[in-house]
Amino acid sequence: MPRRAVQSPFRHNRGAVLIVALLLAAVIAISLGTYINLSLNSQALAHRTFYSNAAMNLAETGIEEAMWSYNDDRVSGTGWSAWDTSVGTTARRTLSGFTYNGNVTGSVRVLATDRTGLGVSPQIIARSTVVLPRGEAIEKWIEITLSKRSKFALGLVAKDSITFSGNNASVDSWNSDPNGDGSVIVPYSSGVANDAGSIGSVDVSSTISVNNADIWGSAAIGGSNLSAIGVGPNGRVGPYGTASGTLDPNSVSTDFTANLEPVVNPTGGTVITAINNSATVTTGVWRVPSISLAGLQKLDITGDVTLIITAAAGTPGIAISGNASINVASGASLKIYAESDVSISGTGLVNPNTQPSSVQIWGTSSGASSINQSIAITGGSLLSAICYAPHADIEIKGSGDVLGSFVGNTISVTGNASFHYDESLANFDTDDPYGITKWRELTTATERSAYLSLMSF
C-alpha cells in the first residue's frame, strides 16, 4: 500500500512570513516614494527660496544704482548719463547679464520717477526678475521714497542731552513754505501751529529731560531705552491732546542717529575792525574780530551779509546786551560763522523776515579743547534763526519765542521759552545727499498695477 505524503505544518508559516515580507516591502516602497517626493519638493522649495532672496538682492542693487545716480547728478550733472531720460523727468534703466549656477539668469528694471529731484517726494521703483530652468520666473518689486538729508530735519537736535527747565517751556511747529517752492510764505502764529515739534539726542548715553515742558510732537533718543526720556507731572510728549505727565507711545523712539558733521569758517572776505558801536554792514563777506554791543547800540544788516568772527575758541565773539541789537532789514540775510562764544540777550537779534533761514548761525568750534563753544540766547526777545553748532552748548532762556531749528552738543531750554520748528527746514540743505524716507515691497497685483505700464520697458 503506497505511503501518503505528509504535509509539513511549517509550509503555512513560511507562506505567512512571505506575505508579511511582501506587505512590509510594499509599505517601505510607498514610504520611500513619499519620502523621495517630499525631498524633491523640499529641494524645489529651498531652490526657489534661495533664488527669491537673490531676486530681492537684485532689486536692491537697482535701487542703489538709482540712488547713486541721484546723488552723483547733483555734483557732476552726469549722474543719469547711462539712463534712458527720453520720457519727461523720469529715468529708466535695465541692468541685465546676471548669471547664477544651474543656468539661472537675472535682470532688474529700475525707474526714477523724477530724476530732477525737484518733486515733493521722488521715488525709485525696482522690478527684478530671476529666470529658472524650470518653473515660473521669480519677481521682486521694491518702491522707495527719497528726500534730501538735512542738518535741520528736526527742531532741536543735541549730540548729548536736551534739558527743559521751568513750567511753561514748549515746542511745536509750523511750515513757513507749505508749497515747497517759495510761492507762499507763512509767518508763525497759533492759528498755523502744528504738533510736529520734533526733538532728538544722538549719543547712546544721552538723555532728554522734558520735565514739565510741552513737546507737541516727537522725541527720539540715541539709546535703546525710553527711560532716557524723562517727563514730569506737567510735561508731555505727543500730539495735541496728550495728557500731562505722559509719553505718547507713537511719538517716542529709540536708536536715533544723525550725522553731525563739523563746519569750518569760509575762506576769503574783507577784514574789518571789531564792531563795538552802532554800525551798518552792507552786502559782502566780512572778517571781524568780534562784535560787542550794549546800551542802545545797534548793528544794521542791509543786503546779504556774511560775518566771519575771527575771535578764538573760548573767548567772546558776539556779545549783545541791554537794549542793543543786531537788526536784519526786511529782505536782507545774515550768516554768522564763529568758533568763539555767542551771547545774545536784551533786544537781541531782530529778524523781521518770515523764514528763519534768513539768519544763520554756524558754530565752527572743532571741539578739540576741553571747553565747548557757548551759544546763549536769553531775555524776552524773539529770535528767528537757524543754528548749527555740533560742538556748542546752546542755552535758550527767558520768556521769548525762538523760531527755526537748533543743533548743538547740548541744548538747554529754560523758563517760559517757546520753540517753534519750521518744518520747511527739512528741505534746507539742497546740496546734501538723498536718503530713504520710505521702503516698501510691492507683493500684490494691486500694489504693482500702479507701476505696471511704467515698468514694462
Image: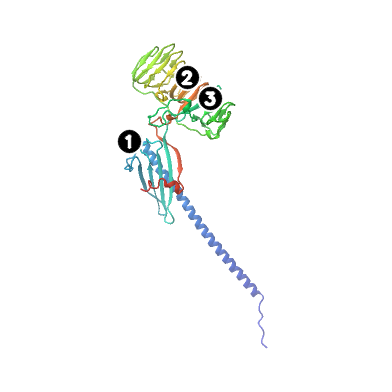
**N-term mark: 1 or 2:** 1
User: How many numbered marks are there?
Assistant: 3
Q: Which amino acid does label 3 sit on?
A: Thr
The residue that mark 3 highlights is 163
Please, is residue 21 above or below residue 302 in the view?
A: below
**N-term mark: 3 or 1:** 1
Locate residue 436: give its quadrant: top left
Q: How far apart are labels 3 and 1 at the CA level?
A: 44 Å
Across and down, in percent, residue 172 comes to: 49, 27
Query: Is 192 in front, or is 244?
Result: 192
Q: What residue type is labelled 1?
A: Gly
Whether label 3 touches label 1, CB < 8 Å: no
The residue that mark 2 highlights is 377
Please, is residue 399 above or below residue 456 in the view?
A: above
* Quadrant (top left, top right, bottom left, bottom right) of the N terminus: bottom right
Element under disc 3: strand
The residue that mark 1 highlights is 77
Element under disc 2: strand
